[in-house]
Image: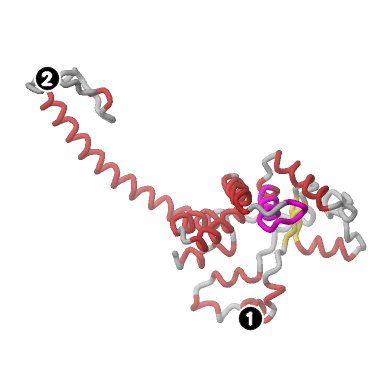
Amino acid sequence: MSDGGGDGGRIVAVSAIPNISWVSPPKNMVEVYVKLTACLITRSRHKDECNRRASELRDEALFKDPPPKEGCPICFLPMPLKLMCCASLPDATITSVPIYDFAIANEEVAKLDLEEYFPCCGKSSCGGCVHSFRKSENIFTCPFCKSERGNKTDEEQVEEVLKRVEANDPASIFLLANIYYRGEGGLQQDQVKAMELFTKSAELGFSKAHYLLGHEYYQRGDLKKTNFHYEAAAIAGHELACRWNHGRRV
């Protein structure tokens, strides 16, 4: 519309001003200015309210009980925690937790993954079932689908993982990312590709990918992304990303 003033009839795109509704077309630029000012004031108030509510929702998600861990498909028991997850406890309670002393004295055991992922069937089995299965002389066989794994080359194992990746399996995407990150399985080391895959796995809700990305961005000094991924991992129930990593916000 034209402001009708002495500036040569400059055109003002009133329709482009966001969040303003007009009962009737504005008569002059004074009316436009008054309406726009009121809109900006209201938007500022709404912004503060929205930010406050977003912070409340974030805290509710972060500090509520995490979702239950996935059960082992063989024994149907919840997947066991890592022993070193007790490091997430507050300093005042660490000395009262017996498992902490055992974890410190047996650090190699404490850091072991107590579940194992098998790309042949896309299942994770608990360490107890895997151990029992291998003790029964089934060392190179998947404990769930019973497929033979000992005679496969590195290339065949990577091809197996790729099939699961095509199905958007976040655990397989995470596994492939680790392969690229370390340059294993006959693949050339490519950490850029690995980060892309870690990110894709995290976008699909895989808590381990969120935790690893938090650690990686911390090493790179990107504290905003560090906190985002640690929070996401904690909300998803990752033991080592729980309140300890988040309680000491970086």
How many discs mark residues in the rendered view? 2
Mark linked to residue 101: 1
Amino acid at circle 1: Asp
Q: Residue at x 50, y 62 (%)?
A: 218
Seen in the image, is 7 located left or right of residue 247? Answer: left
Dot 2: element: loop
Tell me how far mark 1 sits from mark 2, CA to CA.
Answer: 82 Å
**For residue 240, which quarter of the picture?**
bottom right
Pointer 1 local density, CA inside 10 Å: few below 14, some 14–19, many at least 20: some
Decide whether residue 22 is among the magenta residues: no
Q: Is residue 196 above or below residue 111?
A: above
Q: Which residue is mark 2?
A: 8
Q: Residue at x 10, y 23 (%)?
A: 7
Q: Earlier in the sequence, mark 1 or mark 2?
A: 2
Seen in the image, is 38 located left or right of residue 121? Answer: left
Q: Viewer-nearest of labels 1 and 2? A: 2
Of the pair 218 and 186, the residue shown nearer to us: 186
Q: Is residue 205 visible?
A: no
Region in magenta: 173-187
**For residue 209, which quarter of the picture?**
bottom right
Amino acid at circle 2: Gly
Q: Position of residue 181 (x, y in %)?
A: 66, 56
Q: Residue at x 48, y 63 (%)?
A: 246
Seen in the image, is 172 located left or right of residue 146? Answer: left
